[in-house]
Amino acid sequence: MDPLNFEKINSLLDRDVDLREKIKEQVADLDKKTRNMVGMLNKENLCTLVPTLLDEVRTVLLSCRDTTCALANLIPQNQFWRWKDMWSNSLRSAVFAASLVEYLSTRTLIPLPKVSELLGIEDEWEDRLALPVEDYLHGLISLVNELSRLAVNAVTLGNFEEPIRISVFVKELFIGFSMLNLKNDLLRRRFDSLKYDIKKIEEELECWSQAAATLSTLTAQFSSHATLETIERVNRLISAWPVDDTIPAEGLDGVKATYKKLAPALRDIQNTAEEEAKALEDAIERVGVLIALRKAPLDTTVQEKRPKRPRALSPSGTPVPTGPSAVTSRSSVSITLPARNSVGPAASGFSRDPKSRREALHKQLPLQEGRRVAFHPPPGKTANGTTDNDENTWILALVTKCINADKNRYEVQDAEPQEDGTGVLYNTTLRAIIPLPDPNASPGNPAHISSYQTFPAGATVLALYPDTSCFYRAEVIAAPKEMHPKGNLPPKYMPTYKLKFEDDDNQEHTVAAQWVVEWPGTS
């Protein structure tokens, strides 16, 4: 054994360590600048940002060129993909800041080449430093997350035109994302959050649109010529009515004729008054909502929460957050769950062994067509060309058929449609399937919710994150019996849990029990 070989290996390792430290220094500088930009954009409400502040953000953005140039000079040739995860999060934050400044300035989407130009990333660096399409798209998703917050604040400030512009912009961006074949990687799971943001923006638009509509209806009723003419006719008929009990000279026939005209006219006025009162009450209610929004405190924190939280690891083992910017996520507070191999007090002892799975589910087999399941998809290619082997990836799927009458083999379909409008089909086994409780099953049926175990507070579970089609690890904060005390149950009772999802900044979510199952651990 030649000692020189180990000396050479040791020399290479030392050189890698030295290079890694130098890269970390530049990434720290880039990260500092992106935090500065996000902080400046969050200095005051974006609805009232002045051009001078946007110019200050552009100045910081342009100063990133020095850092990117230094990084490009450090990275050896053809080693971009080896080191990219170290600065990927900072680049996404820079894309987020650049795209937000571009939108606030021109109300348009900034293209990828322009972001690269602003950051000083040159084409000849592509084997050392580049702006990957995936990081660009992550930055745009973060932009939409922030614009949904901006739409709320715009309504709060009485700017009702801005939410309309945001809604049009976000919907066009969503259509563009829908055309991409994102498969089952991290980017697709973050793409799910756009639906939630669109819904949030539409709710704001609906709020003030309804208020405007009720005010328009009320104005139209008050200014109706037919109503004014009816009132004038009634006034004339009343003036012709006898002022006392004496019969007029023309006799009772004239009084009867006046009565026949006066009675329906008064009924018309009564109906009109009731309609106006109803419209007025509706307008007061709608305007009251807007007034409450105006008085509500502004949401002044840049949105960092992600309905989709999976994270990839860099070569050095450093977590790479996927939020709009890793800027503030470093100081966020996350829940502490049990270690991966030591889940909470879940009692089932989940096993992926084929025989154990068949024994545990034998009463429900074969799974029927249309049955909803949590499905662990096979490893696949991600947007950057790498392989996704995350054992904790579980998506919502539907059983389409049992293969060859084999109770262990099934064809399932991803509940998330692709660009052709249908979900991806997979051939799989019970090892990768967790049947979900069937809300339509009759009591006593093995698929009924009552046949599934109830998880106590503190248990670790697998649950569907709200407004998404993906399942994540979560901790039970409150069990169904604590959510719905006895004697206070709705007619069609569906138990619910209060959960804290992993890496979700201590947020608590209410999730129906039909979307909560045992934590499968890792295989």
Image: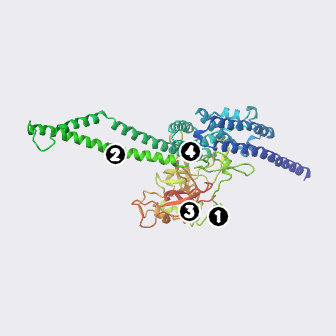
Q: At label 1, which amino acid type do we have?
A: Ser
Which callout, 1 or 4, points at the residue further toward the start of the chain?
4
The nearer-to-camera label among 2 and 3 is: 2
Q: Which residue is mark 1?
A: 342
Query: Front-most of 361 and 34?
Result: 34
In the drawing, what numbered circle is on residue 149? 4
Q: Which residue is mark 3?
A: 477
Q: At label 4, which amino acid type do we have?
A: Arg
- Callout 4: 10 Å neighbours few (<14), some, many (20+)? many
- Is residue 435 visible to the viewer in this orientation of the structure? no
The nearer-to-camera label among 3 and 4 is: 4
Alpha carbon distance from label 2 to label 3: 44 Å
* CB atoms of marks 3 and 4 within 8 Å: no
Q: Callout 4: helix, strand or loop? A: helix
Q: Which residue is mark 2?
A: 278
- Is residue 295 visible to the viewer in this orientation of the structure? yes
